[in-house]
Image (spheres, grey):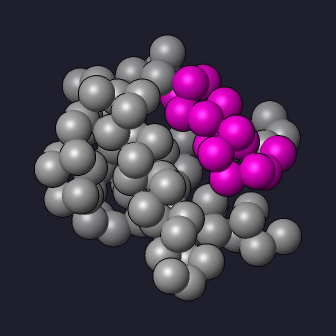
């Protein structure tokens, strides 16, 4: 599995766990799938938990100044951000 595919799989599992989406809904996410404001489970409380889990599961550190609303607009944005952080 490539690093990119590993990050994708980890992120989907994380969203399934944290948001309670279940594997099928997490697997169905596309780059254009809306997250914050689109998924009722993805509220402001969930954002903090998702960020903490991303750090733990992907072995990354996320600074507050790196976070903006755009990252959580779509699954593709969140995935691209995660992949950049893992590659750094």
Could you say which quadrant of the image residue 37 lies in? top left
Residue furthest toward the front?
1
Q: Is residue 81 left or right of residue 25?
A: right
Horizontal side of 79 relative to 19 (left or right) equals right
Taking the spot 46% from the left edge, 42% from the top edge, the residue there is 14
Q: Residue at x 71, y 42 (%)?
A: 55
- Residue 42, given in percent of the width and then of the height, sits at 36, 29
Q: Is residue 33 left or right of residue 81?
A: left
Residue 8 in magenta? no
Whether residue 68 is visible? no
- State whether residue 80 is above or below residue 45: below
Rendered-image quadrant of the C terminus: bottom right
Residue 11 at least partly seen: yes
Name above or below for residue 29 compared with residue 36: below
Residue shown at 42% from the left, 28% from the top: 18
- In the image, what residue occupies the spot 49% across and 55% down? 10
| Residue closer to the observer: 15 or 73 | 15
> How many labels sit on residues?
0
Looking at the image, is 43 positioned above or below residue 85? above
As for residue 59 lying within the magenta part, the answer is yes
Q: Nearer the viewer, residue 86 or 38?
A: 86
Q: Depth check: give the residue in front, 20 or 31.
A: 20
- For the record, the magenta segment spans 47-61
Farthest residue to the bottom: give it: 2
Query: Residue 49 location, x and y as percent?
Result: 56, 24
* Image coordinates for residue 59, horizontal then vertical, percent: 76, 51
Q: Position of residue 58 (x, y in %)?
A: 67, 53
Q: What secondary structure prevails in the magenta region?
A: helix
Name the foreground residue: 32 vs 11. 11
């Amino acid at each position: 599995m490539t690093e990119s595919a590993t990050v994708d799989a980890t992120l989907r599992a994380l969203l399934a766990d944290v948001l309670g989406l279940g594997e099928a809904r997490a697997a169905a996410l596309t780059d254009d799938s809306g997250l914050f404001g689109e998924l009722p489970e993805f509220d402001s409380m969930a954002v903090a938990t998702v960020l903490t889990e991303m750090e733990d599961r992907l072995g990354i550190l996320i600074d507050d100044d790196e976070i903006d609303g755009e990252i959580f607009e779509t699954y593709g944005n969140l995935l691209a951000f995660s992949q950049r952080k893992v590659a750094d």
